[in-house]
Image: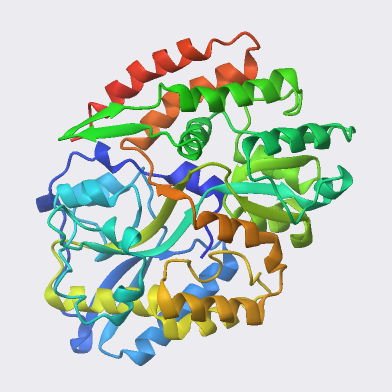
Amino acid sequence: MQRTLTRRTTLLVAVTALGLSACGSESSNQPAPGGKVAITVTGQPPSSQAIERKIFDADVAEFEKLNPDIDIVPHEGFMDPKTFSAKLAGGQLEDVYYVYFTDPANIIARRQAADITEHIKDMAVVKQLQPALLDIFKDRGGKIYGLPTANYSMGLLYNRTLFTKAGLDPDKPPTSWDQVRDAAKKISALGNGTIGFADLSKNNQGGWHLVTWAYAMGSQIARQEGEKWTADFNNAKVKQALQLLKDMRWTDNSMGEKQLLEATDVQRLMGAGQLGMYLGAPDNVPVLVKEFKGKYDDYGVAALPGSGTLLGGEGYMINPKASPEKIKAGLKWIDWKYLDPNRIEQRINQYLAEQQPIGLPAIPTPDIYTGDTRAKQAELKTKYANVPEKNFAAYLEGNTRLKGNLEPPNAQQVYAVLDNVMQGVLTNKDANIDQLLSDAEAKVNSALAQVK
């Protein structure tokens, strides 16, 4: 199931804003007709995503056929910040519910998820999941409250055709920020409105990208001391990133005149063949092809230069009021639908039947495994690839050396503040980076003070 850059930035949820207790969440534990266990589950794609919806509904039917004692009641949608808190308070939370990686820590602290530690002891796939991803769903005592089902990390998305035109080797994308700057200048020199590099700066997306820059440079955004969080980005590493952006924008003129961009703006430019590079995850590529008339052969994704990247993803948790029978049924659904290594080839074939891309990182099977399962997944994706896998080799190889960092607490509030920093650098030639960061630091500390 694809998560586009646009969807991710508009639906990321800061659950720290939910001042709710577990007692507000109820799960109907009445048996379904015929002795079945009925469970409500989120994650059914909207009807506008016809292919994903078709595959999901087919999976529900197949699962119920294989498990006649379980009745899946799918609910459309994923994690909607406009309704999630109300559902929790009103007792309408599903038995199995979707979360972003930013959510579990606060959900666990507020006892809004069931402890599944004992229930998953015999679930073989758990031992094949990346430990760092499983840790996201653990409390400080090591108990487990959910399972990861997909992840992504930010990379450098680039136009291979423009690289070739600019005399750059598309099979050797930049591995340092100096090389990114040099490539952006050469691509901009092609003329005809071509832009070497673009970045986002509004609707919280600029702040989201500044966090990515900070991680790439080896900085954090916030640090925790005991129970208190403090801003940790007003430093030389983040200043270096902002100075680079400022130089590219105003000295090199390689970022174009139009600023205050958001996701769809850079995707439109890239799809039209007018943009050389931007920060993004591989799931942007199908968007460029399907929505902006691009071609898979034209795009590549490399790992971010530097020492770190922004790690994100999703998983599922169980209603804390669910009965043991519902927990068992819910975990069986999560395992079969999202995790089962024996279904990797089936899932690939489902996408092939719908003429969907195979060979992109994380699509249609998530890169969440280790060991034999990961090797099997890679072998199958190569076997069935219908897009050029080599275009993403630098991303997969490079990510092995990068530290993955989660989003900061109260992410959306932090992003809103950091938008102003990005806007200042990209719209004001005389912007004072020190002052922008100092102002932002005070406001981010206020946002972090609300973290409980």
In the picture, residue 196 is in which quadrant? top right
Asked whether 245 or 449 is in front, the reply is 245
Q: In this view, does 83 lie to the left or right of 46?
A: left
Q: Residue at x 70, y 33 (%)?
A: 181
Q: Which residue is drawn at 63% across and 31% down?
A: 261
Is 439 above or below relative to 18?
A: above
Is 368 above or below relative to 119?
A: above
Asked whether 293 or 348 is in front, the reply is 348
Q: Is residue 404 left or right of residue 146?
A: right
Asked whether 102 or 130 is in front, the reply is 130
Residue 139 % position (x, y) = 17, 54
Is 155 above or below relative to 177?
A: below
Residue 9 % position (x, y) = 49, 42
Total count of labels:
0
Q: Is residue 339 left or right of residue 48?
A: left
In the picture, residue 240 is in which quadrant? top right
Residue 30 visible: no
Q: Which residue is drawn at 58% across and 67% down?
A: 50
The residue at the far left in this view is 23
